[in-house]
Amino acid sequence: MILYNDILGTVGNTPIVRINKLADHKRKNIFAKLEFFNPGKSVKDRIALNIISEAEAEGKLNKDSIILESSSGNTGIGLSIVSRVKGYPNIIVVDKNCPNEKIKLLKALGATIVMITTEKNDSEDLTERRIEFVNQARDILDHVFVPNQYENPNAPLAHYKHTGQEIINFMEETGIYFKAIFISVGTGGTISGISKRIKEFDPSIQIIGVEPLGSTLFGGEKGPYLQQGPGNYFQPKNLIYHDIDLGIKVSDQDAFNMCRRLALQEGILVGGSSGGVMHSAIDMCNEIAGNVLCVLPDGGEKYLDSIYSDKWLMEKGVVVEQQNINDVHILNIDGLTDYSEFIRKLRGVVLKDEDQGTL
Ligand code: PMP
């Protein structure tokens, strides 16, 4: 066993697992790197730690510094963890599309939260408005350090040094080599860092970027999308296209239904960008002669009231393929000591027997 001197020591070295039931073929050649094993439950802990550590090493932070960043939520959570350990106050600028669960986590982690809101189109991406706010605030507030995940080279470097290297170590240690790696794209930090390291190791490994349909990182028409975290309407400096072989788009419908399937068939609870990446990999894996790795950016706990809520999906017009996320069966025990009737019906519910299945 290892003693970690603080929680930051547990960032990275996330596991890779085999996907067993989802892909409709016998080769079992799809694998997933689970970034929700990081302490903030997402890939973004890696960049938060690297950006702040490097800024400290470069003398850009002092005891009066305030960390200020725009985030769809996960970078904010990562930065809040790093800020608490290192003792800096921090301000996180989110927008009204940020899931409530992420806001609650930011609060619990002691961040000062600013939420940008508008009465306009429901699913319009507000990233650029958040960045505008940060740029104005940095000029007015004193002692502010802006990590700037969209441009700071220490974001992709975290993935070059660690995530990409971990994938190479896995291949060398297990003998399981990947022909293609599917990576979700937002700021570009993850894909740019991993692709640079992987192409140095073996340029024939395909790097495939995945963005929401409606995002314009790989061109196409701008439109609304519900996947939180990936995608943008502008091309961040940290998105380096040089080592990306292909950019593909995935609809909310396909991404969210794949989240449901990952949970129900593999027991892997993840967010929408992970569903998008897995959907794309399963769609294309028969064209790829060899093993495929999906980097899954975050866990599903932050989306229980959205992706994992039938009601929310239906309100948003997403068709739910597997509406079998189970109800809670309530047993009122007032004046009741014999539960046998309830239990007999429960058997029917578990076995999905329609005749007996109503409690
Ligand atoms: N998925 C989720 C859930 C995210 O939070 C992010 C980052 N905002 C991404 C995907 C995209 O990662 P990157 O910014 O490194 O391109």
Image (cartoon, rainbow, N blue to C red):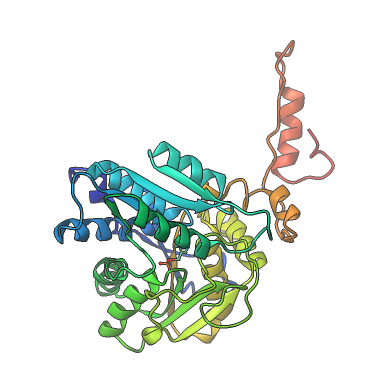
Considering every residue shown, the one lying at the far top of the view is: 335
Compared with 101, 69 (above or below) is below
In-front residue for pair 100/308: 100
Residue 316: percent from left, percent from top: 72, 57
Q: Look at 38% across and 76% down and name the residue there.
A: 237
Please say if 41 is above or below 193.
Answer: above
Left or right: 268 in relation to 150 = right
Quarter of the image where ligand 1 sits: bottom left
Where is the N terminus found, in terms of image quarters? Answer: top left
Residue, far right: 355
Q: Position of residue 20 (x, y in %)?
A: 51, 64
The percent coordinates of residue 22 (x first, y second) are 57, 66
Query: Considering the image in quadrants, where does the C terminus appear?
Result: top right
- At a point 70% along the width and 39% down the height, the residue shown is 327
**Quadrant hosting residue 322:** bottom right
Q: Is there any visible trace of residue 36 in the rendered image? A: no
What residue is at 72 percent from the left and 58 percent from the top? Answer: 320
Residue 316 in sight here: yes
**Total labels drawn:** 0
Q: Is residue 93 above or below residue 175?
A: above
Q: Residue reaching furthest bottom?
A: 204
| Res 189 quadrant in image | bottom left
Residue at horizontal 29 percent and vertical 69 percent from the top: 170
Q: Is residue 197 above or below residue 71?
A: below
Q: State the image coordinates of residue 263 (x, y, percent, origin top left).
A: 56, 54
